[in-house]
C-alpha cells in the first residue's frame, strides 16, 4: 500500500492551499484517513481525520479554516486549507488506517510529507 501526497507549497498568510492524498495497492477497506503535521520544534500532531461514515474531527487550531474530505471510490483524501496562518507552516503527512484483506487487522500507513510554508 502506498499513500501519495501532493499539493504543498508556499502561500501568503490568509491564502489557501489544497492537499491531496491517494492510497493505492492492496486495499480491502479504509477505516480512516487523516492529515498530520510536524511544525518546527514540535511533535507530529493530528490536523484532521475523517472516518468511515464521514465523521470528521479537527485540531482546535484549524477548526473553521480547514476542511477534510474523502472520495471513497478513489481512496483519496483532501485537505482544503483556508485563511492560512504563519503557524500552519510545517510538513504535512497523509495517514490511513486500513485493512489489506478481510481477515486482517487494521494497519497504519503513511505518505511522504509535503511542505507547507506560510509567509507574511
Image (spheres, rainbow, N blue to C red):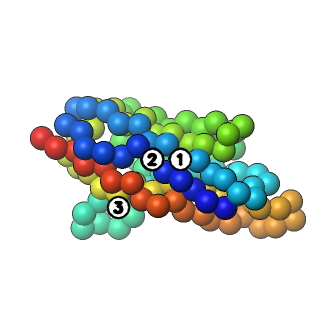
Which numbered disc, 3 or 2, marks the residue that appears first in the sequence? Answer: 2
Q: Secondary structure at mark 2?
A: strand
How many marks the image carries: the answer is: 3
Q: In the rendering, at what x and y percent does residue 15 appear? A: 26, 32
**26 or 56: which is nearer to us?**
26
* Residue 30 visible, this orientation: yes
Disc number placed over residue 6 in the picture, else none: 2
Q: Residue at x 60, y 38 (%)?
A: 70
Which numbered disc, 2 or 1, marks the residue that appears first in the sequence? Answer: 2
Would you say the residues marked 3 and 2 are in contact, meaning their CB atoms lie under 8 Å apart? Answer: no
- Distance between the alpha carbons at the discs numbered 3 and 1: 17 Å
Disc number placed over residue 118 in the picture, else none: none
Q: In the rendering, at what x and y percent does residue 99 appear? A: 75, 60
Q: Residues within 10 Å of mark 1 (few under 14, many from 20)?
A: many
Above or below, 48 against 81 in this view is below
- Distance between the alpha carbons at the discs numbered 3 and 2: 16 Å
- Distance between the alpha carbons at the discs numbered 2 and 1: 6 Å
Q: Secondary structure at mark 1?
A: strand
What residue is pinned by disc 1?
A: 21
Q: Residues within 10 Å of mark 2 (few under 14, many from 20)?
A: some
What residue is pinned by disc 3?
A: 38
Q: Kindly report which numbered mark, 3 or 2, lies closer to the viewer in this rendering.
A: 2
Q: In the rendering, at what x and y percent does residue 69 appear? A: 55, 36
Q: Residue at x 25, y 49 (%)?
A: 117
**28 or 34: which is nearer to us?**
28
Q: In the rendering, at what x and y percent does residue 44 appear? A: 39, 64
* Residue 49 visible, this orientation: no
Above or below, 3 against 73 in this view is below
Would you say the residues marked 2 and 1 are in contact, meaning their CB atoms lie under 8 Å apart? Answer: yes
Quarter of the figure with the N terminus: bottom right
Amino acid at each position: 500500500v502506498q499513500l501519495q501526497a501532493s499539493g504543498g507549497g508556499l502561500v501568503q498568510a490568509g491564502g489557501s492551499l489544497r492537499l491531496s492524498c491517494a492510497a493505492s495497492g492492496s486495499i480491502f477497506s479504509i477505516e480512516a484517513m487523516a492529515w498530520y503535521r510536524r511544525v518546527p520544534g514540535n511533535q507530529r500532531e493530528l490536523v484532521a481525520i475523517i472516518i468511515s461514515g464521514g465523521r470528521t474531527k479537527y485540531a482546535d487550531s484549524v477548526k473553521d479554516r480547514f476542511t477534510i474530505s474523502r472520495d471513497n471510490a478513489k481512496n483519496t483524501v483532501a485537505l482544503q486549507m483556508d485563511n492560512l496562518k504563519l503557524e500552519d507552516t510545517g510538513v504535512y503527512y497523509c495517514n490511513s488506517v486500513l485493512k489489506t484483506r478481510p481477515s486482517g487487522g487494521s494497519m497504519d500507513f503513511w505518505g511522504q510529507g509535503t511542505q507547507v510554508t506560510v509567509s507574511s
